[in-house]
Image: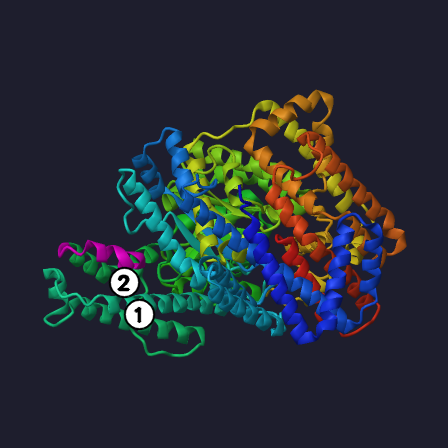
Amino acid sequence: MSDPHAPLRDDVRLLGELLGRSIALQEGPELLELVEEIRGLSKSARAGDHEAFERLTARLVSLSADEIRIVARAFSHFLALANIAEQHHRVRRRAERARSGERPGRGAITDGLERLQDAGLALSAIRDQILDTRVELVLTAHPTEVNRRTLIQKHNAIAALLEDHDWRGDSPRERASIEAQLAAEISSIWLTDEILRTRPTPVEEANGGLLVFESTLWEAIPKRMRALDELLRAGGAEGLPLDAAPLVFGSWMGGDRDGNPNVTPSVTRRVCALHRWLAADLYWNDLDRLRAGLAAEPCSDALRARVGEGREPYRMLLKDVRSRMDRTREWARALVHGEESGVTDPYLDPAEVIEPLELIRSSLNEVGAEDVARGELTDILRRLAVFGLTLARIDLRQESSRHSDVLAAVTQHLGLGDYTAWDSAERLAFLRRELQGRRPLVPRIMEASEEVRDVLDTLEVAREQGPGSLGAYVISMARGAADVLAVELLQREAGISPPLRVVPLFETRDDLEHAPVAIAELLDDPDYRARNGDEIEVMIGYSDSAKDAGLFTASWSLYRAQEAMARAARERGARLTLFHGRGGSVGRGGGPSHRAILAQPPGSVQSRLRLTEQGEVIQAKYGLPGLAERNWDRALTAVLEASSTEGVAPKSAWIDLMNRMSEVACDQYRGVVRGEADFVPYFRSCTPESELGSMNIGSRPARRKSGGGVESLRAIPWIFAWTQTRLLLPSWLGVGAALEVGLQAENRETLDEMRREWPYFQTLLSLVEMVIAKAEPQIHAHYERSLVPEGLHPLGASLRGSLARTKGLLLELLGRDTLLGEHAVLRRSIDVRNPYVDPLNLLQAELLRRTRGGDEGLEDALIITINGVAAGMRNTG
């Protein structure tokens, strides 16, 4: 039997050889020899040669600044190319399975439909479930995508050439041509400055985030909708109506102002226009193609009545639609640039575009051209259902205290007292009274601070936006029902109609425990129900809860909070939508989305789910058309399955043991992060945390406030810094203490039962296993020796000892000798990367030592190593 992964190794080898050739041509053969020498030493060290590790370290320390830069670039680019090859291989394997008739992988749409039918659901019932489903993937600009947009586009071009290589590479001439094009792309990458020289503005961030719509999603989504429609029809069920949109997109880019003073009301206005500009441009291209292919003469009486006499009636109508879309494009472009366009009739509502297209579709069906109607025209109508005229709805996000400050300014101006000084009951009573009344509350003329004016101006921008521009209003650091009612009141005062959904975000362990009470308070309020119906949405934050209490405790707190919130909503006859604020790393809720969704508490996924896709995760999941299709399938099938099957509810013994394990895990985590006096100095000296600020990878400051300890640091750089040193501490610290309790003799039977039967616990263990498999204590110890004052070394030794104990306990529970023994592909992926990531880590430690010692001119090389380690570790933040 042939090895299905041999083509991946061939691709990696080919790309590596072409990169080496480019280095030799651009930098000289001596530098390629240096790179190869370092690669050889690194591979030997990985094979267990301790002397090779010492020689490798000494060789890297001896390099000049220019040599360091070139070596860092070589290994960093190789890892990026390996990532491209892996992503392409996933797409290739999916296509091979489909062609061979092999059962599709877990999460494919065909696999999902089969599983639901095996569970007893009729295909017609599954269709109804699909129509009731609403999954929203919310793209965020969190600063973990370290690649420039220019490089992302070049990487996509290489992936497309690898696909050509698969299909046309049998011919020597074709193969040579494709490999020449690959060589040219890789040489171009080598000649490109990979460093972002200026910090992106929020508008530039948003523009970068929209790349994925243009490059993959625009084609992938109607293709998947068509495939799903055909599967339903082939099984004897009705197909999907053209307005079906079980999976849609949102965005925080340009709307998330929590802790980012650069996201101003003006920025939000411009980004809303930017979305419409790109959407109009994409639709214009579609309409132009459709018009070119629709030269038919026969048409319905209704279409003839619309266009009047003349030849090519379809083209006549499409000319008008296309012209108005062109004006819409110009109108939106002018808004982005703060110019006047003079356009008076831009398309604002998708219904305005759908109506003439439906007229054309109806006419084609009437004259017997159904096959024509099912082509490009149907794809455009499906895009309008999913993307609207804005591609993705932008959420607004602001911290809860900012709304309290606005209301305090109002109440003090009106002589009613200080809103911020009132307790929860007083605030709720005031808000309910004002929401029941009709009189305006906020004076038109009122002295206000800059921060208060910013909130009011943001609401004014929200009022101006057309249909489909904005999604939800998310309140970070929400504490209770009053935070929700405050934003409802402020929206009413601003005249926002219809108002945005108000979504509280519960982030810390304490707030998560209180969240079900807040849900009950809202749903028990008849006026709230009158305004919002029987739907309620809550966001749960993985990042801050994990930074607050550690991964194990945060995961369990989130699980219990979801259970309790779902129960509170169900008991009150309401449907809860949970919005999961997950990052790319395990320490911020990352991991395979399909498994994570299926591991949610039974009854918590009721055909509704929102999920953030952050930073580098966007490119990893949606950067190639095949990947976008695969992840669309996986998200949709997981929600369908979780909504339609009972799931595994935890037994009381499991809950009791998890509660005890969670407590000791939290104690161990906080005992180190909060209780260890040397921890913050150790963290600052051992990791590149302070240097990360020099990387222009996001518009948001890395800190909530200057100075301070870990609590002042945002969750993303906290995770990112530990990932760079390969200790990955936030993703496992505390787990060892939990496993020690679970593996005690009196608990072992229960723990083994949880591991065998409980998807939630299986998923948690799988993520921890992956993290520990990626951790490299030897590399971390090198950072310590190079950078940390000797007096702090005992803390580092203690942390590495804790990691070793955690690994041993995990293996004992799993009953295995090695990690990832049941995940051979992932194990090999890590093993292939390690010899290329290790030199980057060693170089980074040396660069940090030199720059902190006063050496200048090394910043570029340092940033390149940070980029390279991020590429090698994949899920960075």
At a point 67% along the width and 34% down the height, the residue shown is: 662
SS label for mark 1: helix
Residue receiving disc 2 = 353
Residue ID for mark 1: 325
Q: Amino acid at mark 2?
A: Val
Q: Which residue is located at x 22 percent, y 62 percent?
A: 356
Mark 2: secondary structure: helix
- Mark 1 touching mark 2, by CB under 8 A? yes
Identified at 77% across, 44% down, the residue is: 672
Mark 2 closeness class: few <14, some 14–19, many ≥20 residues within 10 Å: many
**Which image quadrant is residue 261 in?**
bottom right
Neighbor class of circle 1 (other Cα within 10 Å; few <14, some 14-19, many 20+) is: many
Report which quarter residue 721 is drawn in.
Answer: bottom right
Task: Decide if residue 784 is on the left or right side of residue 759.
Answer: right
Give the alpha-carbon distance from disc 1 to disc 2, as whole Å.
Answer: 9 Å
Q: Quadrant of the C terminus?
A: bottom right
Q: Answer yes or no: is residue 784 visible.
A: no
The image position of residue 701, as x and y in percent, is 64, 63
Residue 808: x and y in percent read 75, 35
Residue 383 rendering spot, x and y as whole percentages: 34, 57
Magenta-colored span: 366-380
Disc 1 marks which amino acid? Met
- Which one is nearer the viewer's eye here, 212 or 386? 212
Does 404 sit above or below residue 853? above
Residue 334 in view here: yes
- Magenta span contains residue 376: yes
Image mark for residue 180: none
Q: Is residue 512 above or below residue 324?
A: above
Which residue is at the front of the view, 731 or 814? Answer: 814
Residue 787 point in image, percent of width and height: 83, 59
